[in-house]
Image (cartoon, grey):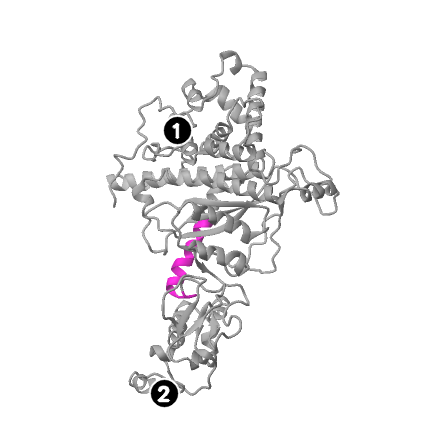
Amino acid sequence: MSDPMFNVALNIVERAQLASRIERYKTADRPVNTGGRKLSIPSHVAVTLLLIQALEGDRACHVTTAATNVLQRLSPEQCTALGIQVPTVFEKRSSAAHKRWRDRIHASLDALFRLIDPHWNPNRRNRWLKADWNAHMQARDPDIVERKMERLYDFNNAILRATTELLPAKYREKFQGARAVDGTSYRTSCRGTSEKSNRMSVEPNAWWYNRNSKDKKLDNTKPKFHGYEATLFIWTKEFTNDPDEYPFLVDAMAHNPPAKAASEIVVRAARTLFENNAKVSTLRADNQYWAGQNIDKFHQPLWTMGFKPVTSYRSGQRGLQGEAQHGAVRIDGDLYCPSILDAPNLVNVGDDYMSGRIDRDKVRERIAAREPYLLKNKHKTPFGDKRVMMCPAKRGTLDCSLRQDLSAANDRLGLPIFPVASAGAICDNKHSTTFGTPSKFEQEYRYLTDEWFEAYGQRSQVESFNNDLKNSALGSRNGIRLRGFAAVALVSALCVASVNVQRINTFVARKTEEAEGRRSRAASRSRSRRKSGWTDDLETTPTPGDDPDFVRKEPRTGVRLSVEDSPPDD
């Protein structure tokens, strides 16, 4: 096994501090050491063996393969670095020894899953009767379920954050927190059961993915399958035209059955970023999230963490949104003077554009015509806080018959005069009006402006990452043979980590070639076909605070694993 790849896997586990996390979970569950047989392979080492398979680009993560790697591929030095017994020559040729190593790895992983699986199922070989499974689920302690769910997210997302730290600091520091979030579904190796059956699937926590939509614009050819959904937080640029200064990586993910508890799992994954002081800024999401979830369960927690929405709206949500507030009307997320309702073509810009009745140029024209009616913030406040807004006539963009004190100044500007009756506080208050109730339709950039198109267009980075992810074990029917909620979640996190590392490797290699002036069309084509390969510019040098419980051995070869000689900034 190549030393550079092995050391990348080892470094990820060290940076994630998996060994200390596992010990912390054990101590919390069992403060007093009650004895018991010591594991032949520590749980974090078993995770490392699975991670090696993912990094090698295998379309499967199997314990059988992990046992084969220990017996046939790991060098004595690598076994020593992992802290495991070096196999003898006899063991390497013995099928019984292979079975023993499989059992050891299974035992280590089971010990981990007992600590982090909120839906722990000791019987993962047989199908439960639905009545027995429902009774088993109802008998669980909600506090234990919540504690283990938090551990699962903490454990898996620590691995993803560790992979982003492999990116050299000079690139990593340019990331300012812009992200997109979306889910991708994948099948398990176990068959599902119908609602009429009295038995559960062998993978009872999974559920059916079924895209059944009447919208002809959607791709309805995707098959129905039994599986899970991974919801990914991926780095993006703030605007599409910004330069590529870093690769687009996933640093947090959620795991759940398809289309189940979307708001809960997104907030839980986002909290792992917030609690670890990750940079956060705009968050792009389709209309399932910002425009489709409950404001108290979804928006308020994310606003508190510092995420700023960039989203689209569903049919029926575009244009006029909700009732008037203090006389002002909300259109496409923003508050406007009520006199804009006299110009329906300015209200229904979104519906007209989505239906194809107008093009982008006409959209720009109508959005510009909206501008004079727009209420402006008197003071910039975070999302979710009270808004102090000023009437457009007070700003001098409209002339209103209710604002006679401003008419002389506005008349000099040639502004239209609107003879209207008072619509509420926004018309009656002398200076400004406070809006205390936030709206889930608010977003960072005004809907359908050029700025919004540039920002929202970066949501496509999720689709690009999903495409790369389908080339891992998640894209194979038999890629994940481990069973259980936490087991599948862990393997999916390792697959995401492998895509992160490959993207970092490709990005750093490209920057190196650009700095050296040696990039060519032929080299670009060759790189796009490469499935695996390891640049020596990854930051695999341990950092202060790395896991002290993981024994590390330097590589046998002279491969450079620091970035001291990496190319200068562009």
Q: Is residue 450 magenta?
A: yes
Which residues make up the magenta segment?
Answer: 446-463
x, y percentage for residue 319?
A: 49, 71
For residue 85, the mark is none
CA separation, marks 1 and 2?
Answer: 74 Å
Query: Viewer-proximal residue, 303 or 486?
Result: 303
Q: Which image quadrant: the N terminus?
A: top left
Q: Which residue is mark 1?
A: 7
Q: Is residue 323 magenta?
A: no
Q: Which residue is mark 2?
A: 404
Counting residues from the start of the chain, the first of labels 1 and 2 encountered is: 1
- Dominant SS in magenta: helix
Residue 560 picture quarter: top left
Picture layout, residue 415 above or below residue 306: below
Quick check: 72 left or right of 141?
left
Viewer-closest of 244 and 18: 18
Residue 480 visible (yes or no): no
Residue drawn where x is 64% and y is 39% of the image: 203
The three-letter amino acid code for the residue at tag 2 is Gln
Q: Look at label 1 and name its amino acid.
A: Asn
- Tell me which corner region of the image, top left, top right, bottom left or bottom right, holds residue 378: bottom left
Q: Residue 157, percent across and down?
A: 47, 41
Q: Give the class, few, some or many, for how many residues have Cα within 10 Å of label 1's Cα (few <14, many ≥20).
A: many
Furthest residue toward top: 90
